[in-house]
Amino acid sequence: MALVLGSVLVGLRFHPAPSARDVELEQDQLKPNIAASTGTCGVERWSVKTGTDADAGLVNVGTITPTTIATMRSYPAPGTLPANNRVQPQETTVYSIDATLIEYKLETDSDYHLVIRDGGGSTIITEIADPACSAGSRFLASIQSSRGEFDSQFTATGSFKTTSVPVRLDIQFNPPPASATVLSVTPNSGPAAGGTSVTISGINFTGATAVTFGPTPAAGFTFVSDTQLNAISPAETVSTVDLIVTTPSGTSSISISDQFTFTGMTSYFQWFDLASAGMVNDNVHLINAGGSLAHVTITMPGARGINLTVDASAEIHATFGSGFVGGPVMVNADQPVRASQRVQYYQTFNEVWAENATQAATTSYINWFDKASAGMYNDNIHLLNPGNASATVTVSLPGASPLTATVAAGGETYVSFPQGTIGGPVTISATQPVLASQRVQYYSSFNEVWAQSAAQAATTSYVNWYDKASAGMNNDNIHLLNPRSVSATVTVSLPGATAVVATVDAGAEGYVNFPQGTIGGPVTVSSTQPVLASQRVQYYQTFNEVSAQSVSAAATVSYVNWYDNASPGMVNDNIHLLNPGTATATVTVSLTGSVSQIATVPGGGEAYVNFAQGTIGGPVHVSADQPVLASQRVQYYSSFNEIWAA
């Protein structure tokens, strides 16, 4: 759907379309008249622009020719531009372009100066003349209509303003009544049970006869003005739908701006990225751990929502596709769905589970920050506010100036310390509970880990495997963070290795490791005070971090979203099993279409299994007669990733 701006004269001011640099230069060179809404008329071939030139009668106003920005950019510039005559056929043809308005301002010659862009990134300049400067123009009625329609949506001043609104630019004489256009829906989500009061903003709502949320009529709606309706959401299945307004002129066309999400059980990812260099895949995987069909919708700002159904005990994955970047990503479901995000960045792989609002905290921690070591290109702290009130967040690190950010309700942002910063712990303090994570780019690898709160600290926690012996395993450090007010004495032990003891001061962080050549598991972290432990591994020129888990996370049934020992680059995919109890556990690891793997894990012991080369699919189901901690350790090309089962 496009906002139709009748009588915008496209092609009547003939000049090459601007590049981004051209626009920057023009901004620098303009001298706006801010004191008045109308400046001085009559510059830059004014008669041609307003239709008062000698050739105005040559314009065929009875035919509109759809075109594209790319086509107009391809027109060769004429050798000369006559001051009071038209270049044919470009300036005697009425063009129509569907594009996105990205910048506008009031020029010193009284024009509205518009910069529009197509889906491929090409831009062009078009203008709306001031009707007060267009006396005698055969286009005057259309210029007045266009200027009025623009003024109903925007306020142009002498400085550039940015926006992102779909527009249709043309010149229309006696245009038909315009259909309704929905420009925003506030709030744009509400419970599937219905009953949410929604404000619909847009244009051409006069005479509205119906409002529907997807296929379902609104529970009620009220006409407020030509630009506003109020509606009550109906009951609907968990999904993202288009909010449609019907008037005597027809129904509003669908757009990203009209989407409304019927929510259920909500979980979050910080960020989606299939636009940045090196981002090969970014998939959201879903396991339906419930006993009934699940309705799921996945949303992110700037993209159309994805609606899915997932059978009981089944797995599915989805993506927004190439070109999208931003956050947060929200997963809503009417069954207990477990969601994870699997990212391929160049020839590396990372997976992270979604988190929900109950895991948000006003104080949380990340073990280590590093923008100083060789290869550490980016280290960003992402902040997601799942609540209904704005949050002020302070991110602090010993030896560095604190960073402060305001995160709107339902919003996401990120901060980072300056290049050269290294150390820990990172403390995230907020006025409202937030979900924080750390996204790291190390050489050509990517890793994300969620922050943890003091409530997740434990006196005993575990890591499945330690490896400073295998080829490529350059570093394997166990980081220890003490969120309490009393010093902690921590013992890190591993079968066959001498235990390592460290003292971690209150509020401080430290790390230990075992000698080169050490391999095995499990790693047990025992402390006199509850601590947050994590394992940070450098494998060749890639990096991965995984948090230690306590016995409270052990389960008799858990899942891993996807198994892949078939795709190019997938070197190893092992399911590790750790038994934190005292009784022997018999564990069955199953995957549809494959022979189940059975392992016996003694109390306090660790084992791992895998499926045959060529196996791919999901979910992986881990069942045991004693609670176990299961994880998946993947080698993809020369990268390594570990994720706990959930």
Image (spheres, rainbow, N blue to C red):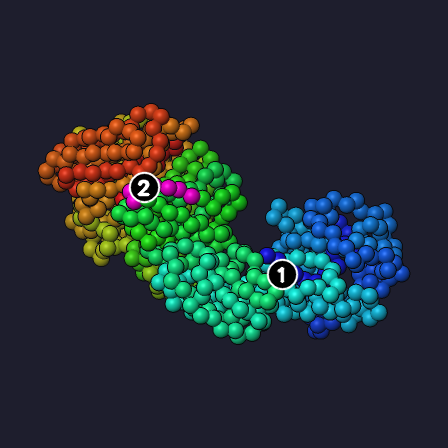
Q: Position of residue 263 (x, y in %)?
A: 37, 58
Judging from the image, what secondary structure is the residue with disc 1 in?
Answer: strand
Question: Residue reaching furthest right?
Answer: 54
Q: Position of residue 226 (x, y in %)?
A: 58, 72
Determine the residue positioned at 21% across, 46% down: 553
From the image, tell me which residue sits under label 1.
3
Q: Which mark is residue 323?
A: none
In this rendering, would 215 be left or right of 369?
A: right
**Magenta stretch: residue 371 in it?**
no
Residue at (75% x, 63% y) in the render: 173
Q: Position of residue 515 (x, y in %)?
A: 25, 31
Report the amino acid beneath label 2. Answer: Ala
Q: Position of residue 286 (x, y in %)?
A: 35, 44
Helix, strand or loop at disc 2? loop
Q: Is residue 462 above or below residue 212?
A: above
- Residue pictured at 62% horizontal, 67% vertical: 154
Q: Which mark is residue 314?
A: 2
Tell me the crowding category of disc 1: few under 14, some 14 to 19, or many 20 or more residues within 10 angstroms, Cα based.
Answer: many
Quick check: 62 left or right of 623?
A: right
Say whether residue 431 is visible. Answer: yes
Q: Is 333 in front, or is 541?
A: 333
- Tell me the magenta residue range: 312-318
**Residue drawn at point x = 82 percent, y = 57 percent:** 59
On screen, 197 above or below 318? below
What residue occupies the far left of the structure in this picture? Answer: 583
Quadrant in the rendering for residue 362: bottom left
